[in-house]
Image (spheres, rainbow, N blue to C red):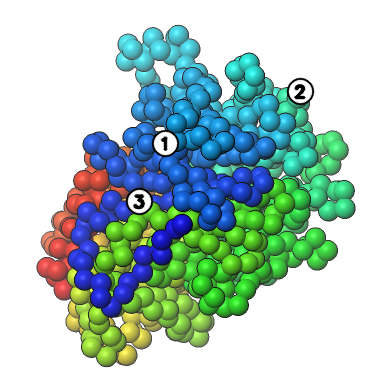
Amino acid sequence: MPQPAPRPTPESTDLLTAELVVDMASPVAPAISSDGRLVAYGVVANSGRDGRPHSSVWVAAADGSAAPRRLTDGTARAAAPKWAPDSAFLFFTSDREERGTAQLQRILLDGSEDSAEAEPLTRWRGGIGDHYPLADGRIVALLAEDEPTPEDEHREAEGDDAKVWGRHLPATRLRLLDLATGVVRTVDGLGDRHVVEVAQRPDGGPLAVLSWATPELDPGVTTAGLHLVAPETGAVQDLGPVGFEAQSPVWWNDNGEWHLAHLAVTPGHLVGALAVIDTVPPATGPTVEQRNLTVGMPACPTELVQVADGPPLALFADGLDTALHRLDPQSLRFHRLSCAPGTPGTFGTPGTLAGLTASHSGETLAVLMSTAREPRNVHAGPTGGPLLRLSDTSPELRGIRWGVQERLGYQASDGLQLDGLLILPPGRTRGQGPFPLVTMVHGGPYFRHADEFTLTAVDCGQWLATAGYAVFLPNPRGGSGHGHEFAAVVAGAVGGDEWTDILAGIDLLVAEGVADPERLGISGWSHGGFMAAWAIGQTERFKAAMMGAGITDWGMQAGTGEWGVMDAALGGSTGWNGPGPHLHDRNSPISHVSRIRTPVLILHGEQDTNVPLGQAVHFHRALRHFGVEHEFVVYPREGHGLRERAHQLDALRRIRAWYDRWL
């Protein structure tokens, strides 16, 4: 049976090391079998000699009657477990044969898994991006790029690799694998569109296919469309365009009428909260009407999950917590499913849920759950009822003495109610303050700090707390968890209300004697990095700052970042709007560098395409010009986050050393 989850205890005395942080194994991608008996999931860890994350696939009894079993050895990257409709086979991808190239495999779950070998099902050059076992048990839908032609291979060998922009990224296409013959058939009716998600109607009917006009994020996410594909013939029916960041298509049936719902940014907006959009696909032609099922809700949908025998389930970011909801077919509104608040292992427990997956009947589900005192683990149980923890991926954390994570509620300068979190140094109370305070701003901006256990090289609040710092995790306007209007207010106004919201929380902690006003630091990654750079250009109160992968020039970001269209909406304008003055210049930290007196640590991945390295170089040169103390660190091979173990260790130690030096 599973052991108790890691939680701090008064007698915990072990020291938290950087190695413990980066080597912590994390469960991902739970998938419950159709019959609700078994739960498969992945476990990601920095194992192996190459210093990069590897993953293994595990399976557990949903009722906890047997200990979890590892199906793959963790030496390769095994991921994306999904069940056959009869719950007998488990499909997953693995790059065991060729590192970095995932192929589809399956394993028979009949009790002999300890000795069973996974069966390879594809040898698709270029690899398999995703897979969807279909209801007939004979076909698996695959998402995969075209295989290279002999001419492609010759050109690559000769170094003849000029990239024609707009055609430099290969489109992912929908393909159908016949399990009996091994033949892979491509659905040609979608043309050159880039397929991103698939969901089959539960009765074995058509596939709902979400696609973009191009693989590029900009303009791909603005060109999303829905299609219906008949798996037998490959015939395609176009349902028309859908909204920005469309994702998670799901089917549901209401008295014999099939609906198709999905998530997308609230219609009419590029910046704002996600919404659940519903339609009834017509027999022919495009969709006539799309309905927003979450309009006016104070919470924000994060996941939408198909249930074969009923209306969809959804997870909602609700302040600091996550709530499970079910759609009511009569009112077409989502209603919260909950148990007694605070009951351990139930949906009334404060914390977060993610990775929701439901059985065919919808009566049993599995989900990743975390609270302030427990790291994320796989839980399963009846829908809306008590959940049993199945996984135990980080038992080594039980001996660590953690800082108390406290929920905060406070008012913005204009009276709006805000929330956030405060982590105190281990073994310390508010009354023993004031403490040096580091404010850690979340990315996004459409994201949030939830009341969960978070410990990574980027979200390192507990790492700083164990070194004696109090850590403030604010949730300013622009984030998720408080409805659309709260999220949309930052469009064209980054650094406005979100900055004063953060400042109001800092002022409160200073006034309450928690924070030492002479030892304030600020840090963040991505949009949080932007806010750190923005903050030190607005005030000299901060004695140290860390900007990780941050935006410093919104005009340049709109022109070079992969989310350009959204970055233009956030910054307020682009460089091609005319000679100026531009709103994005007013909203850019680079325009305020002459005011900066705060020492700055800049961290950035060399291969970052989300926020290109040029943003950091630009800021570095401006700081150098004005003689501002700073350190600029670039991580080779890294993108928008840090994946390699050595780089994660370096970042953790460097960040803490920076604050130790200046605070």
Helix, strand or loop at mark 2 = loop
Which mark, by number, is residue 233?
2
In this view of the protein, which residue sits in the foreground, 494 or 454? 454
Helix, strand or loop at mark 3 = loop
Residue 315: tell me if it is visible: yes
Residue at image location 61% in from the left, 49% down from the top: 37
What's under tag 1, amino acid-wise? Thr
Which mark, by number, is residue 25?
3
Crowding at dot 1, Cα within 10 Å, few <14 / some 14-19 / many 20+, comes out as: many
Residue at the disc numbered 1: 72
Among the two numbered marks 3 and 2 on one chain, the one whose residue lies closer to the N terminus: 3
Residue 130: tell me if it is visible: no
Q: Is residue 174 above or below residue 519?
A: above
Task: Give coordinates of residue 652: x percent, y percent.
Answer: 22, 57
Residue at image location 36% in from the left, 75% down from the top: 405
Q: In screen coordinates, is 432 left or right of 445?
A: left
Mark 2 or 1, closer to the camera: 1
Q: Which of the 4 quarters of the picture holds residue 168?
A: top left
Q: In screen coordinates, is 325 left or right of 477?
A: right
Q: Is residue 10 above or below residue 326?
A: below
Task: Give coordinates of residue 241: x percent, y percent.
Answer: 69, 43
Disc 3 to disc 1: CB gap under 8 Å: no
Residue at image location 16% in from the left, 64% down from the top: 658
Among the two numbered marks 3 and 1 on one chain, the one whose residue lies closer to the N terminus: 3
